[in-house]
Image: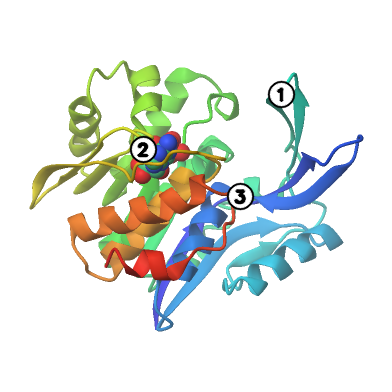
Amino acid sequence: MKRFLTLGECMVELAPAGDQLYHQGFAGDTFNTAYYARRLLPQDWTVGYCSAVGQDAVSDDMLDLMRGHGIDISGVRKVADRTLGLYMIQLINGERSFSYWRRQSAAKLLADDPDWLETQLDGASMAQFSGITLAILSPEGRNTLCAALARARANGTHVAFDTNLRPRLWEDEDTMRAGLRMGAEVSDTVLPSFDEEEGLFGDATPADTIARYRDCGASTIAVKDGAGTLTIWDKTEGTQEFQPVKIDSVIDTTAAGDSFGAGFLAGLAMERGIAASAHLAMAVAAQVVQARGALVDLDMTDIEGTQ
Ligand code: ADP
């Protein structure tokens, strides 16, 4: 059995449902990627989530949801006296505003037990983590996680890093820049978004983004740019450009990048090559931006048409 593993934090989400009511769900970038990878990979693949949760009812609810979506949750550690992080979305004059409660989040302790972490990664064919996974950890936790990923990579795991910048989660911009480099240095594939790289590093073109992560040692770099050109550099194939599917009415871009990552990595995992993996990724993301919410029920006939 081949194993695709994502590592990170999934939180409780409270989204406005009108009249001061809120709908409670669960959301997290790396979990979203696991959700889509499960839909895309064949059944001889296990898709697992590696995280830490509390021992309370809301943590159990989240694990039930994950299990219900076919995700293997044996890599979730339960920590006493902790719970899930929570965020609330408020609509202020039509704009979404976010408030976070994260101090008690068990996921911040994801890397506190190096032996446990190493066991989770052992034998994984692919392991995906993100800038958010790194940002929520302590500096020691970041070192432990990256060391474990580097060891797994040396043992044959394909490590993938979705940069997902969240400036509010990092101590400061310098630490965020150093953290992104650290994540890229242990990764085979890096999935940055051009607008974020432009803002943080002053990149003028996707070629600048590619040069930086190539210097970190990545062998495949896919620079996303929303509806704009997707630029992918690969060690053996060089640089290729792709145009995302044209969409007339974008409904909700939540999880566009997470689902893109799942499609691209699933394509690589199935050994389809760069161009076919890019088309798979863009087809999945195109469906996700045309529906509300992070976890969209994919139309697989449309997806299979890209293969
Ligand atoms: P992130 O959410 O990581 O910043 P992007 O916003 O660049 O990522 O989107 C990821 C992918 O989703 C893009 O490469 C593209 O394939 C697809 N996508 C996002 N927005 C659009 C759009 N408006 N039209 C078509 N495709 C889109």
Residue 100, image x, y percentages = 73, 33
Disc 3 is placed on an element classified as loop
Disc 1: which residue: 94
Answer with left or right where residue 52 lies relative to residue 177. Answer: right
Taking depth in this image into account, of 104 and 24 the one nearest to the observer is: 24
Q: Amino acid at mark 3?
A: Glu
Answer with left or right where residue 8 lies relative to residue 15. Answer: left
* Image quadrant where residue 43 sits: bottom left
Disc 3: which residue: 9
Front of the two marks 2 and 1? 1
Residues at discs 3 and 2 in contact (Cβ within 8 Å): no
Disc 2: which residue: 182
* Image quadrant where residue 268 sits: bottom left
Nearest to N terminus: mark 1 or mark 3: 3
Residue 295, image x, y percentages = 59, 56
Is the residue at mark 1 in contact range of ligand 1, meaning its CB lies under 8 Å from it? no
Q: Residues within 10 Å of mark 1 (few under 14, many from 20)?
A: few
